[in-house]
Image (cartoon, rainbow, N blue to C red):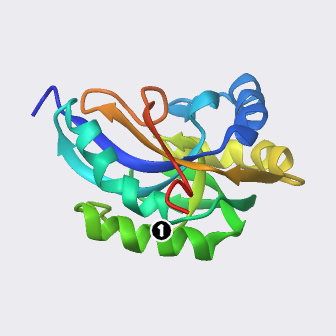
Amino acid sequence: MSDGWYWGVTVRVPAAEPLLRRLADHLDAPGLQVQAPATAHVTLLYAPLRDLADCGDLAERVREIAAAQSPFSLTIGGLFEFTTPSRVVAWLAVTEGAEVLQELRAQLCRCDADVLPHAWQPHCTLLYAEEPAAYPALRPPLIEACADVHLHVTVDALWIAGFPAAGDAAHDLEYRVRVPLGAGQ
């Protein structure tokens, strides 16, 4: 499905925008992709490849779950990495509020298929290093940039977000449908 989209359910993290801008302005290496600042997020559900129009269907399935959840807060910080032979992903951990995200994820996985190929870890992606050999030079300035980062996020909605199959999550992610929390309370 070349015109398909990867849809997901996310929590927006606008507090990460200044950090992502600094990283984009100050880090450079072959294959480096810093997450676009306006798209900082924590993904709760990774849906299968679908049509563009399926975004609204996913939003409808999420509404009841979101309506039953009160707004909550997250704290995000601490630099971590996912490392594979083909890339390194640098990310910030959810340090407070992860239990709410875990419960939401469990409910969301009952309303749609989740295709995450590895164990879920609540996080906010900072960058993708598509050439792992170049990453060690990025690590010291990245550690310095993230040393005192503690982002506070008030979550009052879930977002249906996605990117086209021909695109990438770092630069082509689009928020499409806002699903407010607590509407059923």
Q: Is residue 140 left or right of residue 127?
A: right
Q: How many marks?
A: 1
Rendered image quadrant of residue 44:
bottom left
Considering every residue shown, the one lying at the far top of the view is: 25
Q: Type of residue at label 1?
A: Leu
Residue at 59 percent across and 72 percent down: it is: 100
Q: Is residue 87 visible?
A: no
Considering every residue shown, the one lying at the far left of the view is: 1
Residue 120, horizontal then vertical, whole percent: 44, 69
Q: Is residue 68 left or right of residue 139?
A: left
Residue 93, horizontal then vertical, whole percent: 66, 63
Residue at 52 percent across and 51 percent down: it is: 88
Q: Is residue 62 left or right of residue 151?
A: left
Q: Is residue 25 visible?
A: yes
Rendered image quadrant of residue 37:
top right
Q: Quadrant of the N terminus?
A: top left
Can you say whether 57 is above or below 79 in the image? Answer: above
Can you say whether 161 is above or below 48 in the image? Answer: above
Considering every residue shown, the one lying at the far right of the view is: 148
Residue annotated with mark 1:
104
Residue at 65 percent across and 58 percent down: it is: 71
Toward the viewer: 20 or 97? 97
Q: Secondary structure at mark 1?
A: helix
Residue at 72 percent across and 49 percent down: it is: 139
